[in-house]
Amino acid sequence: MHFAVLTVVAVFITCGVYLLLDRTLLRVVIGLGLLSNGVNLALLASGGLDAGAAPILGQGRAAIVDPLPQALILTAIVIGFGVTALLLTLAFASYQSQLSDDLEDLHGRLDDE
């Protein structure tokens, strides 16, 4: 199971980096989302994927899941959602004002002004 999760992490991070290097602004935002999801999944895998009990006191089980990675991932998901919403808003505003989402084209227009 660990190999499958690590494979998914590698695919997410690879696709995220590939999309981050693209010229289209929307693909850059999607790449950032994929990259953050890959990192979140890697963080979850670092906490241990073995079957264990929920970290609730009083159960009396020896094997429990570490709650720290899950709390960090929940925080990262909320922050990532906010950043993605902000980037999509900025991308939409840029597209409305410049009528293009090509980063090279936008960079050239900024140099001309």
Image (tube, grey):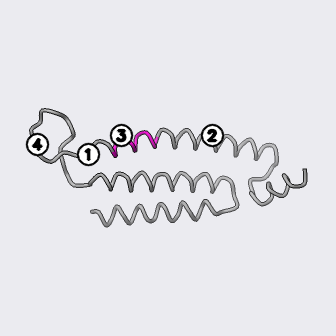
Q: CA distance from mark 2 to mark 3?
A: 23 Å
Tell me which label, 4 or 3, sits earlier in the chain: 4
* Badge 4 density bin: few <14, some 14–19, many ≥20, Cα 10 Å: few
On whether residue 60 falls in the magenta region, the answer is no
The first of marks 1 and 2 along the sequence is 1
Residue furthest to the right in view is 113
Residue drawn where x is 44% and y is 54% of the image: 39
Question: Which label was assigned to residue 66?
Answer: 1
Viewed as shown, does residue 42 lie left or right of 95? left
Amino acid on which the number 4 mark rests in the picture: Arg
Figure check: 31 above or below 54 = below
Position of residue 19 measured from the top left corner of the image (x, y, whole percent): 60, 61
Tell me which numbered mark, 2 or 4, is placed earlier along the sequence: 4
Report how far apart the C-alphas of labels 4 and 3 lie in the structure: 21 Å
Q: Which residue is mark 4?
A: 61
> Amino acid under label 1?
Asp
Q: Are marks 1 and 3 in contact (CB under 8 Å)?
A: no
Amino acid type, mark 3: Ala
Specify the segment rendered in magenta. 69-77
CA–CA distance in space, label 1 to label 3: 10 Å
Q: Give the amino acid type for the residue marked by disc 2 in the picture.
A: Leu
Q: Mark 1 vs mark 2: give the one in front.
A: 1
Residue carrying label 3: 71
37 up-or-down from 13: above or below = above
- The disc at residue 86 is 2
Q: Residue furthest top?
A: 58
